[in-house]
Amino acid sequence: MRVLIVEDERKVAKALREGLEAEHYDVHVAGTGEEGFFLVNHESFDLVVLDLMLPRRDGLEVLTTLRKHGLQTPVLILTAKDTVDDRVHGLDSGADDYLVKPFAFPELLARVRALLRRGRPDQILKLQQDDLTMDLVTRKVVRAGQSLELTVKEFEMLEYLLRHVGHVVSREMLARDVWRVTARATPLDNVIDVTVARLRRKIDDPFQTKLLHTVRGVGFVLRSEPG
Amino acid sequence: MRFLAPSVRTRLTLWHVGALALVICIFSAGILLFVRARLYGALDQQISHDLATIEKVYHEETGDLGELAQRMGITQFQVVEGGTVLYQTPGWPPGGTTPYRLGALRDASHRITAVRDETALRQTLWTLGVILAMGVPCAIGLAIGGGYLLAGRVLAPVGAMAETARKITAESLTERLPVGNPRDEFGQLARVFNDTLSRLEQAFEQLRRFTADASHELRTPLTAIRSVGEVALQRSLSGPGYREVIGSMLEEVERLTRLVESLLTLTRGESGRIQPALEIVNLNGLSVSVVEHLRVLAEEKEQSLSFEAEANVSAACDPAILRLGLINVLDNAIKYTPTRGTIRVGVRETPSGEAVIEVDDTGLGISVAHHARIFERFYRVDRGRSRESGGTGLGLATARWAVEVNGGRIELESEEGKGSRFRIVLPIFLSVPPARKT
């Protein structure tokens, strides 16, 4: 999977490149809008990560021109502006998704995965990790043959973690996708932490292998090996 | 002084003088015309009197016309009968430089014409004209001088106010304008200006406090990130050790992010950039959903969290913004209520037509000294403890904005040690203009 990053901030670009390379993507970096424009026109990419605030040539302008030329590649825009107007404007210009700076890296990875997966049917009825299974139809959760009683929020959170199994999930992602709270100023972190603690009590405490791990300062991850 | 924009004093004088000049001119012209009409009227009356006398003599004793001419002296006349001159005074027709006024009387057989000298009349009118022509400019000149002086005296307080106002800067907002007579226009102006200054001073003071608080709040996580990083670099750690350090730094980054996020929302809201999209909202439903949302937090502290309402209450508000406000209030209540405390959320309608959401707790309570400022940004009753519990210090400020932008108000009743009651009061009907749909 070839990913192009158009980002002028050198530190951010480097972090993005290393982070995405660690996930085994083939990453290319363009430092200016013009360079990005040139690369997209001459090479083929599976995804473009585009910063909106670029020197000389504005990211939105680059995007609009590319779309006019018939470019189909999914584009994820990074922006420091987060008013509704800015978002609508970005999406209208042909972006597939946007992420507001400062963003959590796990969230960027999740968005990238979602964009690359786009178009493929997602008909999963059962989620599984080790001896933990979740039936999305009957809404039953079983671990090691033992049925677990989860509340609605715990179930939704576990489903979300299972869908991102092996990848870190940030509190922001949980707030938006599980609690469906869009206002980032809502005090929700305590609620999330408590829910995680309760979920852990139910799915991990009675068992030998721990699945739900906290990545300090970043978020949570569901995986079998100790983290 | 620029030509196009003269001072108020000059303008005032000019208007004053202009009006006066207009009145004087009209008045003078009126006098002149009136006097002229009266004088000519009198002359014409004399002439017609002459004509009547001449006619009488002409009818009765035509031969005496010459005698009449001598007796009437100043009057010259001519009598014409059927095309021939019957009699005319010597020197007829009148001519030369002397102005005459002429009167005539005619019928089928004869015509009598008489004239009278109007030199004296013209002299009188001329004298009157000269007096007026000299008096009017003098009066206008006096009016200019007097008006300018008067305008200067009237406007003197304005000059004094401007002088004082010029000295008032952001640093010396405590100064006030002198109020002369509080009931006259300038006194009112000074009072209004002073009121504005008071509000400005308050705003500046709040801003100063906010800036100090905000930089403190921002510096604290920055200091933590910096010292944790610096200390870690000095020691050589193992892999997990570094993970621990980076994790700790990221935690502070998250705190900073949350702080900036909340601050941005609040600033945007307070500057009016967020317009509420009003609709009729069932407050019971909204409150229940917020209670359920935060229930886990209360359960962790073994608190009893309940919702009670006698009837369904609705109000016109933006549900998302109001929800944000209520979440902040309830989150605050749970945070400051000790383990096994009781929190009650209630919804009711007042007889005066207001919808009320009440959040009661059996928490620490807030002493009256803090009531006024508890809704300010970053205001904390106990700095250390609030930071421990992970708050941004913006919760209640956000709540207040969220309620006020919906046209409501937020109230606090609290006694130290006994608990607090936060009351969100909303008008039931639309009281703010509906938001612009985007």
Image (spheres, rainbow, N blue to C red):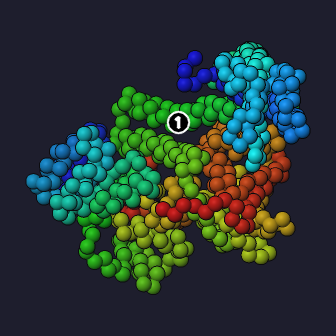
In the image, residue B421 above or below residue B93? below
Q: Please state which of residues A76 and B12 is positioned toward the viewer in this rendering.
A: B12
Quadrant in the picture for residue B49: top right
Image point (45%, 69%), residue name: A158
Image point (55%, 74%), residue name: A151
Q: Please state which of residues B87 and A210 is positioned toward the viewer in this rendering.
A: B87
Q: Please state which of residues A163 and B271 is positioned toward the viewer in this rendering.
A: B271
Graded by Cα atoms within 10 Å as few (under 14), some (14 to 19) or many (20 or more), the crowding at tag 1 reads some
Image point (82%, 21%), residue name: B74
In the image, residue B14 above or below residue B345? above
Q: Where residue B349 sits: x, y (%)? A: 79, 68
Image point (35%, 32%), residue name: B236
Subunit bearing disc 1:
B
Quadrant in the picture for residue B129: top right
* Residue B33 in view of the camera: no
In the image, residue A13 above or below residue B429? above
| Residue projecting furthest to the bottom | A138
Q: Quadrant for the N terminus of chain B, please.
A: top right
The residue pinned by badge 1 equals B218
SS category of the residue bearing label 1: helix
Q: Amino acid at mark 1?
A: Leu
Q: Please state which of residues A204 and B366 is positioned toward the viewer in this rendering.
A: B366
Q: Where residue B381 sits: x, y (%)? A: 72, 40
* Residue A60 in view of the camera: yes
Q: Where residue A126 sits: x, y (%)? A: 36, 79
Q: Where residue B264 sits: x, y (%)? A: 52, 46
Q: How many marks do you count on the picture?
A: 1
| Residue projecting furthest to the left | A42
Image side of residue A63 versus residue B327, left or right: left
